[in-house]
Image: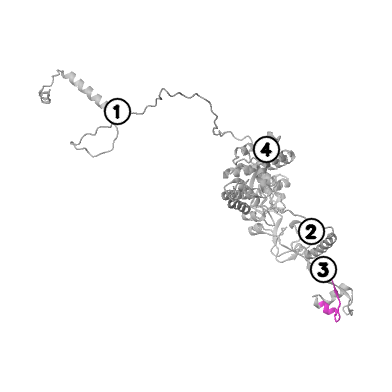
């Protein structure tokens, strides 16, 4: 059948009534709207396609690959395997401070014979461990808080166990001082004041801040906590040179690889041993004292200078306990310009504030006096209205020493000296001493032509003194070969040194035949 014949064929007639046709049309329109609404999508505006353009045909949807395995491949048997899942972080609050410390351990463990040796050493000294951990209860919470704020490994909170056994008054033979054992020069570089009135190397807050600053600096330099600890003990220059030597020889440069003194070699093993004991005390038959996870002390701000004994009295604590929390204070007064904060046990801080508001008496009985010119201790005591003995005791002035101009001395307050110590004195006051001049006894021999006046003039003394020393008249004739006593001024330390040299020389002469062995003095090398 040709297309033409189909076109010429009349369409079949569909007889419909008017009402039925209307209902059919409405139903068809409603169905069309419903289907159109469900399938409508938002498309971007595009240019209209010309009527003559062909309508694009949708590409055929690609068929997905089949994942059905061939029937000839056997399946493996189901088996169990060991896995190492990530640790689950507990949200429970720490039961005590030890628990909190354990959760913060983050350094890689060191495991060698030195660690086991130090574990044995600590485990066999329970009394020492007990004293050390008991002392730590006053300061440990603050250290843990500071380490967490800096996101540092919690092993660092144990470092004072190694450095000072948590004794802020500890001083090494190399003059390192405080809980963190800072050397004088390193302490100055981290703004730890060391003057006649205080030593911030012993201050709990200041020394902790400086130690963590220093450790962060060392870790930033070496990129390894064990090397940072070695540098803290031995000095960063020494560690850097040891690393450089290994690099030149093509050797590893880790903590266990570089050459270092025995003290530094044992430093990290000591810390690891303490860490192991605190992590598993039951394995070492060790009992740790309970230290609550809360502050031991509170910080109190002082607006005026105050006597130490008055602060302790108002806080209702023993003065000894006050100094344990404030070990940097060297004098019986706290100078607010240099030490604006003191530490008090948590509950006693509230008691102090309450009692201070009700107190109406004088706050300080001491002040600082700057010596105007070099003078003896007796002369200085007379000027400030003190006895020489008291002045020496308060300011730690040794015998036969003069106080140099510019020194800062602690003296009682008077009506003329009643102000608080200014900040430049409180922060920089120093005690500078020099030996007193004493008369050294010498003997001179009279030669031909010598006279008493000529000898006196030659040696810079008066004729009267030379005559009195020898119990003769100023006009007495002298005989050739006559021996006269002559007293010449010299520094006290020089006189003692001369005497010591004579004793040592005599002793040396007596032991030459015995060939004594030379004594060896160990010099502690440390970077703090």
Kindly tell me whether residue 155 is visible in this rendering: yes
| SS at mark 3 in the image | strand
Toward the front, the furthest residue is 72
Nearer the observer, disc 1 or disc 4?
4
Bin the neighbour count of mark 2 within 10 Å (Cα to Cα): few under 14, some 14-19, many 20 and up: few
Residue 351 in view, yes or no: no
- Say the numbered circle drawn on residue 38: 1
Labels 1 and 3: the sequence-earlier one? 1
Residue stretch in magenta: 439-456
- Mark 3, other Cα within 10 Å: few <14 / some 14–19 / many ≥20: some
Q: What element does badge 2 sit on? A: helix
Mark 4 crowdedness (10 Å alpha carbons): few <14, some 14-19, many ≥20: many
Q: CA distance from mark 1 to mark 3?
A: 120 Å
* Local SS, label 4: helix
Disc assigned to residue 277? 4
Give yes or no for contact between labels 1 and 4 (Cβ–Cβ under 8 Å): no
Q: Nearer the viewer, residue 385 or 73?
A: 73
Could you tell me which quadrant the N terminus lies in? top left
Q: Residue 310: x and y, percent?
A: 71, 49
Q: Pointer 3: what residue?
A: 440
Mark 3 or 2: in front is: 3
**Side of 428 where 151 appears, left or right:** left
Is residue 2 found left or right of 152 in the rendered image? left
In the rendered image, residue 522, in percent from the top left (x then y), is placed at 73, 53
Q: Nearer the viewer, residue 430 or 14?
A: 14
Is tag 4's residue or tag 3's residue first in the polypeptide sequence?
4
Mark 3 or 2 closer to N-term?
A: 2
The residue nearer to you, when weighing 220 against 112, is 112
Q: Which residue is mark 2?
A: 389
């Amino acid at each position: 059948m040709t297309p033409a014949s189909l076109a010429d064929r009349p369409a079949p007639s569909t007889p419909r009534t008017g009402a039925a046709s209307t209902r059919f049309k409405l139903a068809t329109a409603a169905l069309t709207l419903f289907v159109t609404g469900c399938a409508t999508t938002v498309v971007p505006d595009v240019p209209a396609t010309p009527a003559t353009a062909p309508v694009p045909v949708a590409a055929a949807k690609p068929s997905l690959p089949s994942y059905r395995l061939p029937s000839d491949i056997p399946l493996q048997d189901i088996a169990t395997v060991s896995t190492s899942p990530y640790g689950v972080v507990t949200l429970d609050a720490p039961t005590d401070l030890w628990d909190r410390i354990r959760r913060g351990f983050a350094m890689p463990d060191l495991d060698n014979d030195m660690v086991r040796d130090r574990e044995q050493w600590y485990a066999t000294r329970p009394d020492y461990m007990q004293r050390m951990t008991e002392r730590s209860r006053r300061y440990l919470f603050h250290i843990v808080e500071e380490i967490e704020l800096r996101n540092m490994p919690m092993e660092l909170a144990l470092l004072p166990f190694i450095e000072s056994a948590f004794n802020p008054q500890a001083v090494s033979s190399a003059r390192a001082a405080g809980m963190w054992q800072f050397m004088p020069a390193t302490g100055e570089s981290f703004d730890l004041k060391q003057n006649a009135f205080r030593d911030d190397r012993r201050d709990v807050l200041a020394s902790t801040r400086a130690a963590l600053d220093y450790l962060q600096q060392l870790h930033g330099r070496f990129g390894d906590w064990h090397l940072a600890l070695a540098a803290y003990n031995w000095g960063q220059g020494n560690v850097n040179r040891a690393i450089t030597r290994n690099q030149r020889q093509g050797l590893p440069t880790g903590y266990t690889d570089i050459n270092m003194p025995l003290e530094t070699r044992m430093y990290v093993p000591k810390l690891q041993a303490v860490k192991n004991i605190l992590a598993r005390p039951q394995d070492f038959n060790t009992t740790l004292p309970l230290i609550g996870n809360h502050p031991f002390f509170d910080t109190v701000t002082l607006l005026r200078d105050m006597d130490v004994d008055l602060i302790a009295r108002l806080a209702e604590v023993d003065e000894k306990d006050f100094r344990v929390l404030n070990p940097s204070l060297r004098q019986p007064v706290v100078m607010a310009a240099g030490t604006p904060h003191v530490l008090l046990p948590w509950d006693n801080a509230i008691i102090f504030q309450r009692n201070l508001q009700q107190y109406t008496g004088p706050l300080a009985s001491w002040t600082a006096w700057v010596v105007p010119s070099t003078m003896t201790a007796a002369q200085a005591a007379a000027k400030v209205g003190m006895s020489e003995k008291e002045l020496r005791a308060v300011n730690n002035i040794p015998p036969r020493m003069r106080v140099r101009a510019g020194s800062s001395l602690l003296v009682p307050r008077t009506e003329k000296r009643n102000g608080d110590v200014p900040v430049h004195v409180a922060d920089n006051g120093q005690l500078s001493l020099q030996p007193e001049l004493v008369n050294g006894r010498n003997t001179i021999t009279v030669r031909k032509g010598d006279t008493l006046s000529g000898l006196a003039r030659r040696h810079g003394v008066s004729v009267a003194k030379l005559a009195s020393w020898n119990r003769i008249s100023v006009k007495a004739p002298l005989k050739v070969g006559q021996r006269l006593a002559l007293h010449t001024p010299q520094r006290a330390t020089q006189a003692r040194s001369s005497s010591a040299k004579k004793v040592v020389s005599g002793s040396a002469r007596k032991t030459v035949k015995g060939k004594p062995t030379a004594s060896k003095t160990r010099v502690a090398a440390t970077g703090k």
